Image (tube, helix red, strand yellow):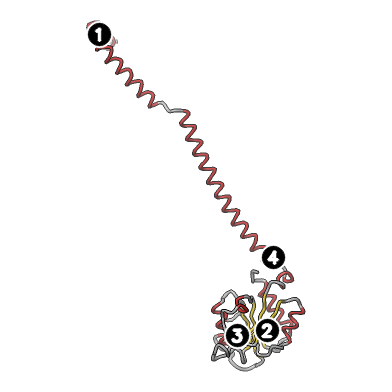
Amino acid sequence: MLKKTKIMNWIIENKEWLFSGIGILIIGTIIKYISKNKENNVSNPATEIKNENNNDNRNENKVDVNINIDTVKDDNSNKQNTNVKMSIDEKKSKLRILFIDDDVKFKIVKILNKAGWSTKIVKDIDNLDSDIILNSHILFVDINDVGVKLDFKDEGLGLGMAIKKKYPHKKVIIYSSQDKGERFHKALRVVDDFLFKNAEPFEFQQIIENFAKEITV
Protein backbone atom coordinates (compact mmCIF):
# COMPACT_ATOMS: atom_id res chain seq x y z
CA MET A 1 0.00 0.00 0.00
CA LEU A 2 2.86 2.33 0.85
CA LYS A 3 4.52 1.64 -2.53
CA LYS A 4 1.33 2.55 -4.43
CA THR A 5 1.02 5.83 -2.44
CA LYS A 6 4.62 6.77 -3.30
CA ILE A 7 4.00 5.98 -6.98
CA MET A 8 0.83 8.11 -7.03
CA ASN A 9 2.61 11.03 -5.34
CA TRP A 10 5.48 10.75 -7.83
CA ILE A 11 3.04 10.79 -10.79
CA ILE A 12 1.22 13.89 -9.40
CA GLU A 13 4.51 15.73 -8.84
CA ASN A 14 5.79 14.86 -12.35
CA LYS A 15 2.51 14.92 -14.30
CA GLU A 16 3.58 17.87 -16.44
CA TRP A 17 6.76 16.05 -17.51
CA LEU A 18 5.07 12.68 -17.96
CA PHE A 19 2.41 14.03 -20.30
CA SER A 20 4.85 16.15 -22.27
CA GLY A 21 6.04 14.96 -25.71
CA ILE A 22 9.27 13.40 -24.37
CA GLY A 23 7.51 11.63 -21.51
CA ILE A 24 4.88 10.08 -23.78
CA LEU A 25 7.60 8.91 -26.24
CA ILE A 26 9.59 7.21 -23.44
CA ILE A 27 6.48 5.56 -21.95
CA GLY A 28 5.41 4.31 -25.42
CA THR A 29 8.85 2.80 -26.05
CA ILE A 30 8.75 0.99 -22.68
CA ILE A 31 5.26 -0.38 -23.38
CA LYS A 32 6.35 -1.66 -26.84
CA TYR A 33 9.42 -3.34 -25.34
CA ILE A 34 7.34 -5.09 -22.67
CA SER A 35 4.74 -6.22 -25.25
CA LYS A 36 7.43 -7.61 -27.58
CA ASN A 37 8.95 -9.72 -24.76
CA LYS A 38 5.54 -11.15 -23.94
CA GLU A 39 4.98 -12.13 -27.61
CA ASN A 40 8.33 -13.90 -27.75
CA ASN A 41 7.59 -15.85 -24.58
CA VAL A 42 4.18 -16.99 -25.79
CA SER A 43 4.49 -20.11 -28.04
CA ASN A 44 3.07 -19.98 -31.56
CA PRO A 45 0.45 -22.75 -31.92
CA ALA A 46 0.81 -22.81 -35.70
CA THR A 47 4.58 -23.30 -35.44
CA GLU A 48 4.15 -26.09 -32.89
CA ILE A 49 1.64 -27.88 -35.11
CA LYS A 50 3.99 -27.57 -38.11
CA ASN A 51 6.92 -29.00 -36.10
CA GLU A 52 4.75 -31.86 -34.86
CA ASN A 53 3.71 -32.65 -38.44
CA ASN A 54 7.34 -32.64 -39.59
CA ASN A 55 8.31 -35.01 -36.77
CA ASP A 56 5.39 -37.29 -37.64
CA ASN A 57 6.47 -37.35 -41.31
CA ARG A 58 10.02 -38.25 -40.34
CA ASN A 59 8.78 -41.08 -38.14
CA GLU A 60 6.51 -42.35 -40.91
CA ASN A 61 9.45 -42.37 -43.36
CA LYS A 62 11.56 -44.35 -40.89
CA VAL A 63 8.80 -46.90 -40.50
CA ASP A 64 8.48 -47.24 -44.28
CA VAL A 65 12.22 -47.86 -44.64
CA ASN A 66 12.17 -50.51 -41.92
CA ILE A 67 9.19 -52.21 -43.52
CA ASN A 68 10.93 -52.29 -46.90
CA ILE A 69 14.12 -53.78 -45.41
CA ASP A 70 12.14 -56.42 -43.54
CA THR A 71 10.23 -57.22 -46.72
CA VAL A 72 13.48 -57.81 -48.64
CA LYS A 73 14.79 -60.04 -45.86
CA ASP A 74 11.58 -62.01 -45.82
CA ASP A 75 11.71 -62.46 -49.61
CA ASN A 76 15.26 -63.83 -49.43
CA SER A 77 14.32 -66.14 -46.56
CA ASN A 78 11.33 -67.41 -48.49
CA LYS A 79 13.49 -68.18 -51.52
CA GLN A 80 15.98 -70.15 -49.40
CA ASN A 81 13.20 -72.02 -47.61
CA THR A 82 11.58 -72.85 -50.94
CA ASN A 83 14.85 -74.29 -52.22
CA VAL A 84 15.38 -76.36 -49.09
CA LYS A 85 11.84 -77.73 -49.33
CA MET A 86 12.24 -78.53 -53.03
CA SER A 87 11.86 -82.25 -53.53
CA ILE A 88 14.64 -84.47 -54.87
CA ASP A 89 12.64 -85.07 -58.06
CA GLU A 90 12.40 -81.30 -58.63
CA LYS A 91 16.15 -80.90 -58.16
CA LYS A 92 17.05 -83.72 -60.56
CA SER A 93 16.66 -81.56 -63.66
CA LYS A 94 18.62 -78.65 -62.15
CA LEU A 95 21.56 -80.39 -60.48
CA ARG A 96 24.60 -81.09 -62.66
CA ILE A 97 26.63 -84.22 -61.86
CA LEU A 98 30.05 -84.83 -63.39
CA PHE A 99 32.14 -88.00 -63.44
CA ILE A 100 35.84 -87.69 -64.23
CA ASP A 101 36.93 -91.18 -65.26
CA ASP A 102 39.21 -92.56 -67.96
CA ASP A 103 36.52 -95.21 -68.52
CA VAL A 104 33.95 -93.05 -70.28
CA LYS A 105 31.60 -96.03 -70.51
CA PHE A 106 31.29 -96.34 -66.74
CA LYS A 107 27.84 -97.95 -66.34
CA ILE A 108 26.79 -95.87 -63.31
CA VAL A 109 26.47 -92.75 -65.48
CA LYS A 110 23.85 -94.38 -67.71
CA ILE A 111 21.95 -95.70 -64.68
CA LEU A 112 21.83 -92.24 -63.09
CA ASN A 113 20.64 -90.66 -66.33
CA LYS A 114 17.82 -93.20 -66.56
CA ALA A 115 16.86 -92.31 -63.00
CA GLY A 116 16.41 -88.70 -64.10
CA TRP A 117 19.70 -87.16 -62.97
CA SER A 118 21.57 -84.84 -65.33
CA THR A 119 24.92 -86.68 -65.48
CA LYS A 120 27.99 -86.33 -67.71
CA ILE A 121 31.34 -88.10 -67.85
CA VAL A 122 34.70 -86.84 -69.16
CA LYS A 123 38.01 -88.64 -69.47
CA ASP A 124 40.09 -85.93 -67.78
CA ILE A 125 40.25 -82.19 -67.02
CA ASP A 126 42.82 -79.83 -68.49
CA ASN A 127 41.57 -76.63 -66.79
CA LEU A 128 40.10 -76.17 -63.31
CA ASP A 129 38.21 -73.11 -64.58
CA SER A 130 36.56 -74.93 -67.47
CA ASP A 131 32.78 -74.53 -67.89
CA ILE A 132 32.15 -78.19 -67.20
CA ILE A 133 33.68 -77.78 -63.73
CA LEU A 134 32.01 -74.43 -63.05
CA ASN A 135 28.58 -75.74 -64.05
CA SER A 136 28.75 -78.93 -61.98
CA HIS A 137 27.31 -79.22 -58.47
CA ILE A 138 28.49 -82.76 -57.59
CA LEU A 139 31.71 -84.26 -58.94
CA PHE A 140 32.87 -87.89 -58.79
CA VAL A 141 36.62 -88.25 -59.40
CA ASP A 142 38.27 -91.59 -60.12
CA ILE A 143 41.68 -92.09 -58.53
CA ASN A 144 43.43 -93.80 -61.44
CA ASP A 145 44.53 -92.24 -64.76
CA VAL A 146 42.82 -88.85 -64.26
CA GLY A 147 44.43 -85.54 -63.34
CA VAL A 148 47.17 -86.50 -65.79
CA LYS A 149 46.58 -83.48 -68.05
CA LEU A 150 47.16 -81.15 -65.14
CA ASP A 151 50.19 -83.18 -64.07
CA PHE A 152 48.95 -84.10 -60.61
CA LYS A 153 51.46 -86.44 -59.00
CA ASP A 154 48.70 -88.30 -57.19
CA GLU A 155 46.42 -88.27 -60.26
CA GLY A 156 42.75 -88.39 -59.19
CA LEU A 157 43.52 -87.77 -55.52
CA GLY A 158 45.37 -84.57 -56.40
CA LEU A 159 42.67 -83.48 -58.86
CA GLY A 160 39.81 -84.11 -56.43
CA MET A 161 41.57 -82.23 -53.63
CA ALA A 162 42.34 -79.29 -55.95
CA ILE A 163 38.72 -79.00 -57.10
CA LYS A 164 37.42 -79.04 -53.51
CA LYS A 165 39.92 -76.43 -52.34
CA LYS A 166 39.16 -74.15 -55.28
CA TYR A 167 35.38 -74.62 -55.05
CA PRO A 168 34.47 -75.40 -51.40
CA HIS A 169 30.73 -75.10 -52.14
CA LYS A 170 30.88 -78.02 -54.63
CA LYS A 171 30.52 -81.60 -53.46
CA VAL A 172 33.48 -83.79 -54.43
CA ILE A 173 33.51 -87.59 -54.08
CA ILE A 174 36.59 -89.69 -54.80
CA TYR A 175 36.12 -93.29 -55.90
CA SER A 176 38.40 -96.16 -56.91
CA SER A 177 38.29 -99.75 -58.05
CA GLN A 178 41.22 -100.57 -55.76
CA ASP A 179 40.46 -101.83 -52.27
CA LYS A 180 44.06 -101.13 -51.26
CA GLY A 181 46.13 -98.01 -51.61
CA GLU A 182 46.23 -94.47 -50.25
CA ARG A 183 43.77 -94.90 -47.41
CA PHE A 184 45.43 -92.12 -45.39
CA HIS A 185 45.99 -89.61 -48.19
CA LYS A 186 45.17 -86.05 -47.10
CA ALA A 187 42.78 -85.70 -50.06
CA LEU A 188 40.39 -88.09 -48.33
CA ARG A 189 40.14 -85.60 -45.43
CA VAL A 190 39.48 -82.68 -47.78
CA VAL A 191 36.83 -84.06 -50.13
CA ASP A 192 33.23 -84.75 -49.09
CA ASP A 193 33.14 -88.55 -49.42
CA PHE A 194 34.85 -91.70 -50.70
CA LEU A 195 33.32 -94.65 -52.51
CA PHE A 196 34.49 -97.88 -54.10
CA LYS A 197 33.98 -97.95 -57.85
CA ASN A 198 32.32 -101.35 -57.71
CA ALA A 199 29.75 -100.17 -55.13
CA GLU A 200 26.08 -100.81 -55.89
CA PRO A 201 24.43 -98.16 -58.13
CA PHE A 202 21.98 -97.26 -55.35
CA GLU A 203 24.99 -96.24 -53.16
CA PHE A 204 26.02 -93.65 -55.76
CA GLN A 205 22.45 -92.42 -55.98
CA GLN A 206 22.11 -92.29 -52.20
CA ILE A 207 25.20 -90.08 -51.93
CA ILE A 208 23.81 -87.78 -54.62
CA GLU A 209 20.43 -87.52 -52.89
CA ASN A 210 22.03 -86.72 -49.54
CA PHE A 211 24.16 -83.94 -50.99
CA ALA A 212 21.27 -82.67 -53.14
CA LYS A 213 19.42 -81.71 -49.96
CA GLU A 214 22.25 -79.33 -49.03
CA ILE A 215 22.68 -77.73 -52.46
CA THR A 216 20.85 -74.58 -53.53
CA VAL A 217 20.00 -74.54 -57.23
Q: Residue 205 location in percent, x, y?
A: 72, 79
When the figure is inspected, residue 151 is found, relative to residue 44, above or below; the finding is below
The answer to whether mark 3 and mark 4 are in CB contact below 8 A is no
* Location of mark 2 (residue): 121
Check the image and name the residue furthest to the right.
114
Q: Residues within 10 Å of mark 1 (few under 14, many from 20)?
A: few
- Disc 1 or 4, which lies upstream in sequence? 1
* Location of mark 3 (residue): 125
Residue at image coords 61%, 60% = 76
When the figure is inspected, residue 166 is found, relative to residue 179, above or below; the finding is above
- Disc 3 or 4, which lies upstream in sequence? 4
Q: Residue 194 location in percent, x, y?
A: 63, 84
Pick the residue in front: 74 or 61.
Answer: 61
Q: Residue 118 location in percent, x, y?
A: 71, 77
When the figure is inspected, residue 113 is found, relative to residue 86, above or below; the finding is below
Q: Residue 53 location in percent, x, y?
A: 51, 36
Residue type at mark 4 is: Lys
How far, Cα to Cα, is label 3 from label 4?
Answer: 34 Å
Under circle 1, the secondary element is: loop
When the figure is inspected, residue 175 is found, relative to residue 115, above or below; the finding is below
* Location of mark 4 (residue): 85
- Disc 3 or 1, which lies upstream in sequence? 1
Which disc is residue 36 wearing? Answer: none
Under circle 2, the secondary element is: strand
How far, Cα to Cα, is label 1 from label 4?
Answer: 98 Å
How far, Cα to Cα, is label 2 from label 1?
Answer: 117 Å
Which mark is in front, 1 or 4? 1
* Location of mark 1 (residue): 20
The answer to whether mark 2 and mark 3 are in CB contact below 8 A is no
Q: Residues within 10 Å of mark 2 (few under 14, many from 20)?
A: many
Pick the residue in front: 42 or 132.
Answer: 132
